[in-house]
Amino acid sequence: MQVQIDPSLFEPIRGRTDVADEIVRPSITYWQDAWRRFKKNKPAMIGLVTVIIIILSAIFVPMFWPYDYATQIRGHENQGPSWEHPFGTDSLGRDLFIRVMYGARISLSIGLVASLINLTIGVLYGGISGYVGGRVDNIMMRIVDILYSVPLLLYVILLQVVLEKPIEQAFETSFLRVFKGIGSDLILIYIVLGLVYWVNMARIVRGQVLSLKNQEFVLAAKAQGASAWRIIWKHLIPNAIGPIIVTVTLAIPSAIFTEAFLSFIGIGVSAPMASWGTLASDAYRGIRSYPYLLFFPAACICITMIAFNLLGDGLRDALDPHMRK
Amino acid sequence: MEKVLEVKNLHTSFFTHVGEVKAVRGVNIDIYQGEAVGIVGESGCGKSVTSLSIMRLVPPPGKIICGEIYFKGEDLLKKSEKEMQKIRGNKISMVFQDPMTSLNPVYTVGDQLMEPLRIHKKMDAKSARRQAIELLKAVGIPDPERRLNQYPHEFSGGMRQRVMIAMALSCQPELVIADEPTTALDVTIQAQILELLKQLKAEFNMSIMLITHDLGIVADLCSRVIVMYAGIIVEEGTTREIFYNPKHPYTWGLLKSIPRINILSKERLIPIDGQPPDLLKPPQGCPFMPRCRYAMRICKEQCPGLYSVSESHKAACWLLDPRAPAVTWDREGVNFG
Amino acid sequence: MGRYIIHRLVSMALTLFFIITITFFLMHAIPGGPFTREKPLPEAIIKALNEKYHLDDPVWKQYLDYWKDILRGDLGPSFQLTNRTVNELIGLGFPITARLGIVAIVFTILVGVPLGILSALRQGKWQDYTTMFIATLGVTIPSFVLATVLIYFFGVVLKIFPTTSGRLTRPIEYVLPVIALSGYSLSFIARLVRSSMLDVIKQDYIRTARAKGLSEFKVIYKHALKNAIIPVITYLGPLAAGLLTGSFVIEKLFSIPGMGGYFVNSVGNRDYTMIMGSTIFYSVILVVMNFIVDIIYVMVDPRIKLMGTKEG
């Protein structure tokens, strides 16, 4: 074949068989890999940055803005957007910009608190159901199935109506008075949304627990005599954390949305504090003459929803181990 | 004898986000009428991609880069998609590896079996149904009239593979490509399916291209064997030549990993150590070099061409070069001469 | 199939039992009863009202009575609109809501499914990007924002469509409310169909269909579509729920005198029997919808039959 080959090339080389086992591509940890994938996902990064901007401005802008959310400036009623009032003013002469910023505090806090309550209930419920298994699991999941087939928004409304007075009373009379500054109808929303929308979380946690609980590392922990709580807390939850983070991230905008929806039909957070939903709902009546009053809160709702959804979708793609290549 | 299929210098690559993976790198295959040829190699060696290339069904991001594929003298790579549709399932058909997922779960078996008859043979519903019943009988499915109206999930794995074979044979193709037809099945079912293929091959006088990683089933059915590794052909010859006088160290490894039924012998199965190379960056030298116990310096630098051992037997290994040290092989071990 | 239906019927009855029980006790857990006002009513009137509505009976008796009424199909009198029963109010509002809802469901499916298919088949091309961009907006923009934007641009500025729809007597009155109401679910279905289609066209049986020599059209519209549509069927239940509850806001914004409007009013007025009655009414509709969807599901996906009978 090849004529001009150096005969010495035909010397055997020994002890080189290990080469094939070398791992060609560098290995990285789960979180590094997730972050690398997340960074590459442009929409997700846009979502993350937007969420950070919204949170920071909700926290810091009210600290130095010259107006307060309740201050009525005489002679400044119903002004369009200007340098002094970037979002304009409402019919009582209140600065809309600062009202939207306070609205951000309220709406974001609703999203966060409600999601955290969901998370707690969902993780406990789903974790117990999946971990105990058998009959208990069967009954608990049957209940979840029933809740799933029910229009939950109706029950949010129902609870809202039912719990209205007890909560108000609790904040008048008991030690909870210290929280009264938050406003009892805001607390009511936290509780109601938190109590109703945990079903999804419970299902996801249960699914994760079921698939994890028979894996070797859990068996090993059991064999060493670890208690059930320790196994759930130390082994199952850390492994199920990816889907849980994603579900929480996606629960935040849906809580914000639900509150806005409730405000729009008249049972959300009431004056003088206003969530974005309340602001939009109030503005709707004057849509013909003062459309900007509606535009800014509505735009804030949309941007926040989109940002959290992009973030959630990106996290899902980044954290889902099945997508690892 | 007439050549049914002639593949010349086929290159197929997958353009993934990390770069071009060269899955098939210059493959030549001839298949004659009525002949069964086995294509053997580990998973990822390019044998399935070769078969999909012949059907022009390489899934994206895969692409046939160059080469010619002559089917009865006509280059399939020059045909339009419409013309290919007339060939697929009609002149060339395929049996896939996993019968559990290869049938559409939401249509009845009869519906799927009649489809090629309706489109290629232009049969009406009634005669297609009659023909489908005949086909199910031919592949040994009892009670075909009733079975025709059932859904795939009501069939066992072996029965589904029989359906797949019936479907492949329905238009009496000249070439059947069977891609690991028995891998997903139980051992006893494997034997039945092989027996069926053998019997049908004689009956229909068709050519078979049998793709497998298991040399054992090749011995049973094929008259010639092609051994692929890392996207190229490393050895080809008649079944006798490959089994009794193999020349490539990779073939030796494959042969040593076939179990032989002999309780008394203390012989152990010897796996081939290591992994095939990453075809994202195919090595410059012989791709088997890193796993080869007999590797020489030249193996690292240059890829060997095919050396002819006999008229029908070729192997791509530097050991066949007259300047290389003599290494001979028998089933019990390799001797350095 | 028969056993499956019985199994589903039993679980439907169970669900309805829980719904009615929970709703009843929640409403009766309100302290002070339904007639507590900011300005207290005279003692005698409260007593008369309590007597009239049997509110001084023990709770268990009221519960049983409520069941008796419900089984007769009677949801009781309205507390706020005297001389009206809940049944009458539902009878007035629901036909209008149902018309809007049905048009919205049909619109959602007829537009959402084709968009999803288009997007999947043109994956990575401009058609895909455009559709998915709009669909991403669609699932994130709340219906009331979409509705107000539509009203503002097409009603107030361009004056193409009426800003109020009234009793939905003319086709043109449907346009804006239907778009606003189905925006979310339409986008959701488009995304669902896209991802399920992308998943299906990677399956082995699609390769088999191609290897048989089927045309690309048949591969997609016969073999892929029927599989890809299955998740859409599972979504029909939540879709109906979303459209029904979504109509609360849409009806308010477009001044449509439907069931949603009555319900929202009853919430505002704390008309407890009406809230309770509407909740139960909506739940019954949705649970029955879910039942029908389950049956369709079995008919489309032959694999489910086996699982259902094994379970039941």
Image (cartoon, rainbow, N blue to C red):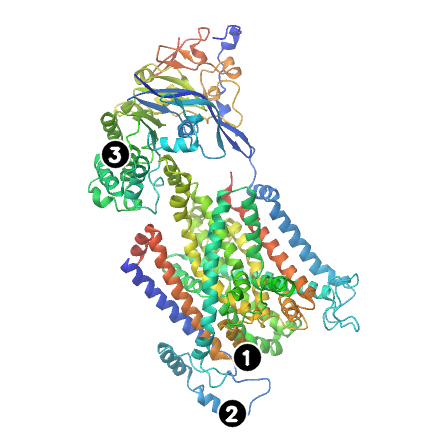
Q: Position of residue B243 (x, y in %)?
A: 32, 18
C287 to the left or right of C159: left
**Circle nearer the N terminus (1, 2):** 2
Single out the mark in the foreground, 1 or 2.
1
Secondary element type, mark 1: loop
> Given the image, what chain letter belongs to the residue carrying mark 3?
B
Q: Nearer the viewer, residue A123 or B246?
A: B246
Q: Which residue is mark 2?
A: C45
Disc 1 to disc 2, C-alpha distance = 19 Å
Q: Which quarter of the rendering shows the C terminus of chain B?
A: top left
Front-lying residue, A209 or B180: B180
In the image: residue A100, left or right of residue C211: right
Same chain assignment for discs 3 and 2: no
Asked if residue A236 shows in the view, the reply is no
How many residues crowd around disc 1 within 10 Å: few (fewer than 14), some, or many (20 or more)?
A: some
How far apart marks 3 and 2 lie (CA) works out to 86 Å
Q: Amino acid at mark 3?
A: Thr
Image quadrant holding the N terminus of chain B, namely top left
Residues at marks 3 and 1 on the same chain: no
At label 2, counting other C-alpha atoms closer than 10 Å, the crowd grade (few under 14, some 14-19, many 20 or more) is few
Q: Which mark is residue B188?
A: 3
Give residue B225's position: percent from left, percent from top.
Answer: 34, 20
Q: Is A1 drawn above or below residue C184 in the view shown?
A: above
